[in-house]
Amino acid sequence: MNKLSSDERARILHLLCEGMSIRAITRLTGASKNTVAKLLADAGRACAIYQDQAFRELPCTRIQVDEIWSFVYAKAKNVETAKAAPEGAGDVWTWTALCADTKLLLSWLVGGRDAEYATVFMHDIRGRLLERPQITSDGHYAYLSAVDEAFGKEVNYAQIIKTYGESADSTRRYSPPICTGVKKRTVTGNPDKDYVSTSFVERQNLTMRMHMRRFTRLTNGFSKKVENHVHAVALHAMYYNFVKEQRGIRMTPAMKAGVTDTLWTIDHIVRVVELFDVKPGKRGPYKKRGQEPSEADQNPSSSRSAMVNKLLTPVTQSA
C-alpha cells in the first residue's frame, strides 16, 4: 500500500489550511479523495490532542467568545427530505474562545447552540486559564447560566448586545444587516467597559470562513460528515495558533501566549501527525492466570496520553 511522504502530507495539509476543497486538492496533487480525507482525519485528531494538552495554565485574562454557524450534509430545514442523511446532519455551531491580548484560539466546541453545549464550553475554558478572566460574549441567553455554573463569582463577565435594523435594499440577501445600536451590560464582577468587545473573535470567525472551504457560504464544499467537520476545525486551530503570524503582535498566537518559542511551519504539523500515528507493535506475552494487569492495561487512555506527551514534547524545542 502506498504511503504519502512527509512532503506530500505537508502540501496537502497546507492546501487544506488555506481554504481549498478536498476535490480541488485531488486535482492538484493527484492524491485520491479518500487519501486526503484520511489525512484530514489523522491530522485533526493529532492537532486536537496536542492543543488540548498544550493549552493549560494560560496567562490569558481577556477572553472573547462567539459562535459561528455552518451545516453538515444539509441545512436543518432540509434534513427531513434529504436522501440518506447521516447522524449529525443539519445546522452545526462552532463555539470559539479567543484571547484578546495574544489572539490565541484557546478553546472551541462543535455542536448545538443550546445551554448544554455552552456549559461544556465554559467549563473547558476555565480549565485552561491561570488567572481570573474578563469574558465578553454577545447577548445569547445560553451564556448566562453557562458562565455562572463554570466560574461562579470568579469572573468579570459582560455582554455586548447589538440591535439590527432591516435593510431596504432587497439585493442584500446575503449581506449582514445594518447595526443600529450597541449596549454593554455587566453580568458578573467588575469588567472593564473599555475592553467589553467581541471584535477580535468575530474577526477570527471570518478567518475560519476564509481558511476552511466547508465554512464558505453558497458552495457545495460543505461538510458531509460531522466528524470531518470537527477534524477540520482542529487542523485550522493548529495552523492559526502555531503557523499563521498575526500582524498586530508580529508573531503567532502560540508564541505570544508562551506555549512555544518557535515559529512553526506546516512541517511541524506534519511531524505532530506522524509522531501521533504510531502503529502498534507486536503483541506481548499473555498474562498468566492470576497475574495483576499493568497500569496501561487498566487505563489505556492514560498510557496513550503519556505516549503522546513523550512524542510531542521535542516539537516545541525544535528549530
Image: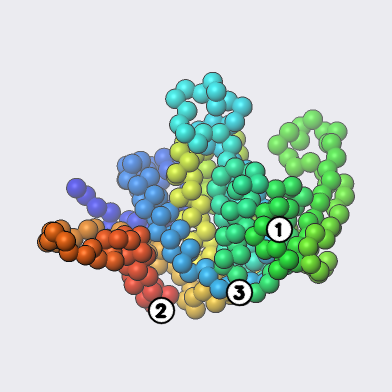
Residue named by callout 2: 317
Q: Residues within 10 Å of mark 1 (few under 14, many from 20)?
A: some
Of labels 1 and 3, the one closer to you: 1
Q: Report which quarter residue 196 is drawn in.
A: bottom right
Confirm or deny contact between disc 3 and disc 2 (CB under 8 A): no
Q: Residue at x 30, y 61 (%)?
A: 298
Q: Residues within 10 Å of mark 2 (few under 14, many from 20)?
A: few
Q: Residue at x 58, y 53 (%)?
A: 120
> x, y percentage for residue 42?
36, 53
Of labels 3 and 2, the one closer to you: 3
Confirm or deny contact between disc 1 and disc 3 (CB under 8 A): no
Q: Amino acid at mark 2?
A: Gln
> x, y percentage for residue 175?
73, 40
Between 35 and 188, the one nearer to me in the picture: 188
Residue named by callout 1: 148
Q: Amino acid at mark 3?
A: Leu
Q: Earlier in the sequence, mark 1 or mark 3?
A: 3
Real-space Cα separation, disc 3 to disc 2, in angstroms: 23 Å
Q: Earlier in the sequence, mark 3 or mark 2?
A: 3
Real-space Cα separation, disc 1 to disc 2, in angstroms: 38 Å
The image shows residue 274, relative to residue 87, as above or below, that is: below
Regarding mark 1 in the picture, which secondary structure is present there? helix
Which residue ends up furthest to the front in the rendered image?
290
Is residue 102 toward the left or the right of residue 87 in the image? right
Would you say residue 216 is visible in this rendering?
no
Residue named by callout 3: 130
Q: Amino acid at mark 1?
A: Asp
Would you say residue 114 is visible in this rendering?
yes
Q: Residues within 10 Å of mark 3 (few under 14, many from 20)?
A: few
Confirm or deny contact between disc 1 and disc 2 (CB under 8 A): no
